[in-house]
Amino acid sequence: MTTVVPPPARAEPAAAAQPVRWSRPTELLIGQGAARQAVRQAGSDAPVGLVTDANLPEGFVDDLAGRAGKRLRRIELRPEDITLTTAEEVADALGGVRHMVAVGGGSVLDAAAVARALISRPELSAPIRRHPRPGLVLCPPGRRPVPHFTAVPTTVGTAAEVSSVATVRTDGGRKLLAGDVLTPNTAALDPAATAGLPRQLVLEGVLEAMMRLLNIHVLPPAGQCPGASDAELLALLSQLARSGAEAAGGERHGVPAALRTDAALFSARTVLGWTTLGRDPFGGKIWYLANELSALAAVRKMTATVSVVPVVWSRLLAGDTRFGDPVRLHTAWRAVWRGLGPLRLPADPVAGFRALAAAWDVPALPRTGAPPPGELAWRAVRAWGGSQPMLGAFGVAELTALYREIIDQPRPTRSPR
């Protein structure tokens, strides 16, 4: 008698991790003449909306306006006055245009992006304006046609010209918006647009781009993170650091056009490349903590950032894994250290970062007039805590102690170059 032995039961495969996605819709125009070409492409017989920073040189803006076609709607914004109401007014003024061109720094480009989202879905105003939560507002696919969006950045480092996120100021603080409708279709990285940018702001922009990478690299990947993602991120960190070192070592009154173009392109690559593959886009804590400090203390975002980083990194290196992985921080700082070349900073990330901020003249938080730590903590938890992934792991008491340390820490002294 033949015994039939059944085949072994096939083990059910473990649930596969979701594949990561990578898609970037923005076309880049790079180099001298890029802004003119981008505006010329937008110009047609259909109405064109031109949104500009009111502080830009008239000659540069007039030259671009002359290439935008005959039916031009021109809107000037003052960055210091931009709020959600501003974006709503821009959306109303540009209803029906087929092309929208925004020329300015991150706040102007963000205002244009938010206006485009409101053209698509006017009802978005309500959750953005809602006080005070959520800090993050997701923009779903639009219901109405939106204009083609061309961005011409006049600063370096924000990457607003290629980003699918934008910030907007409301009565309750700064809100963060995310969605494909915010992403420009075309970005022009033209050194003519950044010709008047002081060296200090170029360096702050380079450091801002570096912080985008450092903020996500210290966290263990949240999904399937290809090795190429870490490799590109670390290489890009070194390239940004090298660009900053070259800018810092040059003439005090300006940065060469080629170097500004490189820095702008490296900054754009922090968003356009695959450095974010398999990572939690909202996991890094520094931006959210610095956002509240910047808003309440009325200081520039990089002043707030360089104040937050040493305290957060100190806690990370002491073993608080909510802020990241100490090994990954050391790895990332070595990439920065290599890129800086002759500017040999301390190998310790905290001491090294403090020295870098001082060497690049990033202003420190003023010693007087700092907001109360408890109020900062309350605002941070209110906007980004609770069930949200940003600061949901922290309570008000814990963040009050953290902000107190940020405010009381010694101010860096400028290092010689």
Image (cartoon, rainbow, N blue to C red):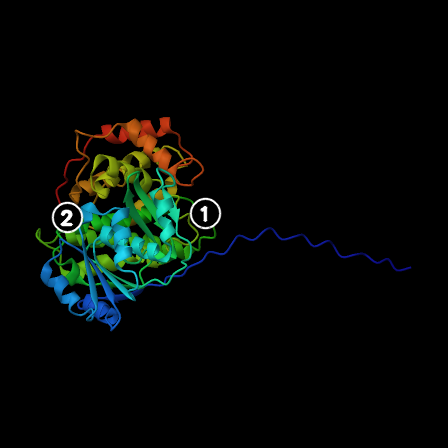
Q: Can residue 25 be seen from the camera position used here?
A: yes
- The location of residue 310, given as percent across then percent down, is 28, 36
Q: Kindly identify the amino acid type of the residue bearing the numbered disc 1.
A: Ala
Q: Give the structural element (helix, strand or loop) at label 2.
A: helix
Give the percent coordinates (x, y) of residue 47: 25, 67
Q: Residues within 10 Å of mark 1 (few under 14, many from 20)?
A: few
Determine the residue positioned at 17% across, 33% down. 366
Residue that carries the numbered disc 2 in the rendered image: 200
Q: Nearer the viewer, residue 362 or 176?
A: 176
Which quadrant is the C terminus positioned in? top left
Q: Nearer the viewer, residue 133 or 164?
A: 133
Q: In the image, what residue type sits under mark 2?
A: Gln
- Residue at image position (30%, 47%) is 167
Query: Considering only vertical position in the picture, is 401 above or below 69?
Result: above
Estimate how packed mark 2 is, as few (under 14), some (14 to 19) or many (20 or more) residues with alpha carbons within 10 Å: some
According to the picture, the residue beneath numbered tag 1 turns out to be: 222
Instruction: Tell me which label, 2 or 1, sits earlier in the chain.
Output: 2
Height in image: 293 above or below 264?
Answer: above
Rendered location of residue 399, percent (x, y): 34, 30
